[in-house]
Amino acid sequence: MAIDQSKSAERKFMVILLVGVGVLFVLVLGGLTVGRRFFSAGSRAVLAGTPVPMPAAVISPDNAGRVVELAWRNTQGVKDVAWSPDGKLLAASSSTGIYLYDPKTLNEVRSIKTSARVSNVAFSPDGKLLASANWDKTVKLWDVASGQEVRTLSGHTDNVMSVAFSPDGKQLISGSWDNTAKLWDVASGKELRTLSGHTNYVESVAFSPDGKLVASASDDWTAKAWDVTSGKELFTVKGPPKYMMIVAFSPDGKLLAAGNDDKTVQLADVASGQELRTLRAHTDGVVGMDFSPDGKLLVTGSWDKTVKLWDVASGRELNKLKVHTDKVESVSFSPDGKVVASSGDDDTIRLWGVLP
């Protein structure tokens, strides 16, 4: 492949590596590394700042085995990724703040510098607000359009690890290393209720699709479901003697998935609280997890450096994506179900999907 020598002065270096049947094209530009994976059958190299080859097909049980890496970019300590409701932005949390990216190019749109490490971010359902879980014991609300802080929610007594908006955007749940989860009124910033019952760090929280329940995952080896109105604990999913790292409700609200440090994912029936199935998922802790928008797939990310896709109905592993070179920390389906985003300790954000 010829390289335009007239532009060589702008580039520190360019490397072409043969990988299987495809090619990995890496461009380093002023300290920013953006890579694109493309495949030889009728494809062209995709360079930094040019359109990512966004798939036309929704990822499904039928084509999940054909999911490949679409693009990646270097980041600075990003631990968590979240899609905006319209799919036009990717938010990433890091030790230095929050970064917003255009998923069509992976160019940075905006950065929000923070005084404390940000462990988790979540968009409001209307996409206008971004909530951050912070290591200064607070939750902060940010205006997405301007990047300005709107409100600080104070009440936790240790690092806040996870946040989630209610489906109507009026409430927010936060989980903290103070062993509690808290419900907040978004408009006023007022604390509505503290959910106490865990005996160790709360690592993850989630709202049910109907907004009536919240779930929490804790280092006390359990995941719990709570009634939003009363604050009553409804049921507990007991894991093996390992930390519960993440929880997620299925889009229809019938299933609660809990990923843990025991390398497994437990699926529980929300109506009964009974465990239905355990996925022997990974060779290290499961810390990232998300259902596809139609609920047919589950994507998991693990400290074993892999991303996996699962058929929810059967519990069958459909694809193992092994490109990250360090622990995977977060995975998330795009709102249209066509792309999965992942982030890891290899300081990358990666996009995955099905190419024609």
Image (tube, grey):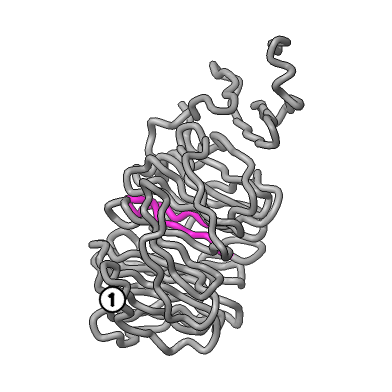
Write the start and end of the magenta stretch as one range: 286-301
Q: Indicate whether residue 294 is drawn in magenta.
A: yes
Task: Read off the residue under disc 1.
Answer: 271
58 is higher (above) or lower (below) than 163? above
Q: Quadrant of residue 305?
A: bottom right
Give the image quarter of residue 118.
Answer: bottom right
**Relative depth, front residue between 267 and 92:** 92
Answer whether residue 277 is visible to the viewer in this image: no
Q: Position of residue 274 (x, y in %)?
A: 38, 79
Q: Pick the quarter of the image with the N terminus.
A: top right
Q: Name the one closer to the observer, 296 or 46.
A: 46
Mark 1, Cα crowd under 10 Å, few <14 / some 14-19 / many 20+, is: few
Front-lying residue, 129 or 165: 129
Main secondary structure type of the part rendered in magenta: strand
Residue depicted at x 44% and y 80% = 237
**Percent x, y of residue 319:** 54, 46
